[in-house]
Structure formats: C-alpha cells, structure tokens
Image (cartoon, rainbow, N blue to C red):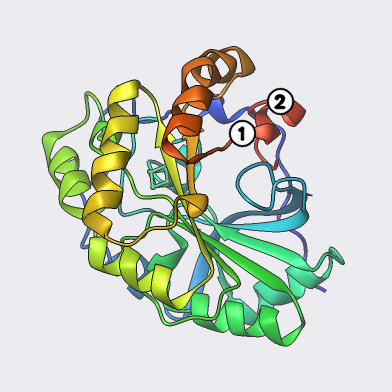
Amino acid sequence: MLPIIARRETTQSGATPGTGSAPRTEPQDELSIGGSANGRLRICELYASIQGEGRLTGMPSVFVRTSGCNLRCWFCDTPFASWHPEGDYLQAEDVVEQCLGFGLDHVVITGGEPMLFPSIATLCHGLKQQGCHVTIETAGTVWRDTPCDLMSISPKLRSSAPRGADSTWVRAHHARRERLEIVRRMMNQFDYQLKFVVDAPADALEVLEYIQRLGEVDREHVLLMPQGTDTATLDRQAQWLIPWCRRHGFRFCPRAHIGWFGNQRGT
Ligand code: SF4
C-alpha cells in the first residue's frame, strides 16, 4: 500500500487565485503539461469526501485531483492545481491502488484539467476493472479516449478570463476555453452533465447562447452553479439564479460542500 497523499486542512483562499497577481509562468503548449508527465499523472491531492456538486451530490467518493491546467479562470478555487500547480507525478496503477484503499466505489477525477494527461485512460481502465464508478470533471477543451461513467463538463464562459493577469494568459485562456466540437463528442460518447459556473445574469444569458450553438441539448443535463466560495455569496446568487433556471428549464446546482465543510482543501 502506498502512502495516501495527505488531506490538508488549509483554506483554499490561503493560496493565490487569479484575481490580481501575474502568473509565474508563460502559457505552455497546453498538451505539453500532460505530455511531459512520461506516462504518469501529477496529483496534488487524493482524499475521500462527499460529492458536493452536480447529479451525484451526496455520494461518498474518492477525489483524485490532477495538477496543471490549460486555463486560468479568475475564480479558480483550486489555484494549487492551476495557477501554482503542485504535487508529485504518480503512475496510474499506483493511483488506482490508493483509491481502492478508501473502500468506496465512486471515484471523481478532477483538477486542474485531468484530460491533459494521456495516462488518464490507464487510470480509468484500472478503476473500471475494479468495479468503480468513474466521474471525470473537465472543462471540455481536451479529448482523450477513455472509459468514464459520468463526464461532468464545465465549459468556461467569457467572464471567466483572468483579471489583472499578464495579457498572454488572457489570450491563451480565451483561445482555449471553448471547444464546441470536443464538448459535442463528449456528449455523444458519455453519460454527461453540462455544469456552468455563473457569476452574473450576463453569464446566464451566455449559457443560452452557448447551448444554442452546441445544438441538440437536453436541458435536464444542464446545471447552472453559482460562483462563490462562501455561503453568504452563494445564497445571494441563488436568489436570482434559482428562478432563472426554473424559467429556462435548467437545473440549479448548489455547491453543497461549501455549506458542509467551508472552502477547505480536501473536501
Ligand atoms: S478550468 Fe477549472 S482548474 Fe482550470 S483554472 Fe478554470 S476553474 Fe481552475
């Protein structure tokens, strides 16, 4: 049994999100992040908790958080997996073994952007062979041929661009954030949910425009989740977003884990 990557109790906001400070690195070729991993995945945390977002809210799950992202959202609540990636490189087989050690059958592979790593396919195959239900949480910008039970796609809207950051990252973010052909392919191949982070009414309107461009979309699969990392902000956003979702046939998606645990790493 390999050592479990420690669950850390520091607040996420203790790290520096993309709201002001310029990123330390230039935008890389996005696929080079995973390509240079030599068949491994960079993992910044691996822990057991309860799914707090989306269709499987309430499900006890193991979370595998890969480190590294091709985007730089200003509201990113995991800067240790995007702006300032950290963590060790592990073989997919070792990650499977650590997951099984928790004795849960639901595994959520999240990030960062887990689809940057080619070996995500080995990881998912290994988990499926052991009877696990696998969710992949992705922004839908990179395609990998991998097994998956629920593809949780979170396309990023215009307003997600980094604020006050170096303009090269702003340009890279906008050039990469929307890949309709990849999102369509994921929707065709997998059971899916489309989960949008919404910060203001203009974002909700952009969701309408987005799904129109996407084509045939069952609105039952579309979830709108308020932006915010504290319950006061989320409650304020819910005031307008819940009735808006009802009017348009979308599902409102609470961030239940913020209420349960606060904005803590390892939850
Ligand atoms: S896509 Fe996700 S992990 Fe990457 S910067 Fe945006 S919110 Fe953070």
Q: Amino acid at mark 2?
A: Gly
Per the image, label 1 sits on a secondary structure element best described as loop
Which image quadrant: the C terminus? top right
Residue nearer the viewer, 224 or 151: 224
Per the image, label 2 sits on a secondary structure element best described as helix
Question: Residue at (33%, 62%) from the top-left corner?
Answer: 216
Disc 1 designates what residue? 255
Which image quadrant: the N terminus? bottom right
Report the residue that reaches farthest toward the bottom. 129
**Label 2 near label 1: C-beta < 8 Å?**
yes
Q: Is residue 143 left or right of residue 1?
A: left
* Rendered location of residue 165, percent (x, y): 22, 30
Q: Note whether 81 is above or below 240 in the view shown.
A: below
Q: Residues within 10 Å of mark 1 (few under 14, many from 20)?
A: many
Disc 2 designates what residue? 259
Q: Note whether 72 is above or below 74 in the view shown.
A: below
Residue nearer the viewer, 108 or 6: 108
Q: Is residue 2 visible?
A: no
Q: Amino acid at mark 1?
A: Arg
* Rendered location of residue 32, percent (x, y): 28, 68
Question: Residue at (31%, 54%) from the top-left corner?
Answer: 70
Location of residue 139 (image quadrant): bottom left
* Rendered location of residue 123, percent (x, y): 59, 78
Question: Residue at (77%, 81%) from the top-left corner?
Answer: 131
* Rendered location of residue 196, percent (x, y): 42, 42
Residue nearer the viewer, 202 or 71: 202
Q: Is residue 260 left or right of residue 195?
A: right
Residue nearer the viewer, 107 or 85: 107
Q: Note whether 133 is above or below 217 in the view shown.
A: below
Q: Is residue 153 visible?
A: yes
